[in-house]
Image: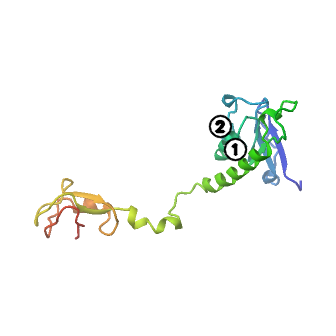
Amino acid sequence: MSKKEVFSIKKNFVKIKDKILFNKIRKKIFIFHCVTDYPVKDENANLNCIETLSKNLKLNIGYSDHTVGTNAPLIAISKGAIIIEKHFTLNKKMKGPDHKASLNPDDFKKLSNKIRQYEKMIGDGIKKIQKCELKNSKLVRKSIVAKKNINKNTNFNLENLTCKRPANGLSPFLIKKLLNKKSKKNYIKDQLIKI
């Protein structure tokens, strides 16, 4: 198989996985979730099926869209579809079942641009500090400060300590170590606590 193969899953869900699909060709096969109606009503689109197909078949999943508008393909992308099929027409009033649910050239271009934007926004799913966040990391993190004026030799407790931005003092993770320890100096409200 030198080309990528595309299959639409219509009507009944068929167990295609069993011994038919070899690991060698797995990356070249795309299964499309599809509802055979023109146009498909929103409540019949069943876009969660994309995740089900992906989980059960462990193949590339696409979406063959017959709904009106562009919402379903965008949702399909967020559900894991990596290919979208949407019918194209020059006139939605033409005869035939496909034209009502098809996009005209302007709408098709808008959908294509939105899909490219969505692909960027989805990311890889791994939570990590991104390079763009580094410049704000100290600003958005917090430090331990005096919640109110604290006199020297007063025990630190949750009544007189709090955490506020920015992170240019003690980390909030150290607050437990401070509890019940005596203040070595006077602090005014919002002053950074030091040990």
Is residue 65 in sight in this rendering? yes
Q: In this view, does 103 lie to the left or right of 133?
A: right
In the picture shown, does residue 100 fall above or below 85?
A: above
Q: Which of 101 and 79 is in front in this view?
A: 101
Rendering coords of residue 189 (x, y %): 19, 61
Q: In this view, does 175 lie to the left or right of 131?
A: left
The mark found on residue 48 in the picture is 2
Is residue 17 in sight in this rendering? no
Residue at figure coordinates x 34%, y 66% from the top left: 167
Residue at figure coordinates x 56%, y 57% from the top left: 126
In contact (CB < 8 Å): disc 2 and disc 1: no
> What colour scheme has been applied to the protein in the rendered image?
rainbow
Element under label 2?
Answer: loop
Graded by Cα atoms within 10 Å as few (under 14), some (14 to 19) or many (20 or more), the crowding at tag 2 reads: few
Residue type, mark 2 in image = Asn
Rendering coords of residue 132 (x, y %): 52, 66
Which quarter of the figure has residue 116? bottom right
Which quarter of the figure has residue 3? bottom right
Of badges 2 and 1, nearer the viewer stands 2
Q: Which of 105 and 49 is in front in this view?
A: 105
Residue type, mark 1 in image = Ser
Image quadrant in which the C terminus is located: bottom left
Rendering coords of residue 183 (x, y %): 15, 66
Label 2 vs 1, first from the N-terminus: 2
Element under label 1?
Answer: helix
Residue at figure coordinates x 33%, y 69% from the top left: 168
Graded by Cα atoms within 10 Å as few (under 14), some (14 to 19) or many (20 or more), the crowding at tag 1 reads: some
Residue at figure coordinates x 89%, y 53% from the top left: 1
**What's the CA distance linking mark 2 and mark 1?**
10 Å
The mark found on residue 54 in the picture is 1
Which quarter of the figure has residue 173? bottom left
The mark found on residue 193 in the picture is none
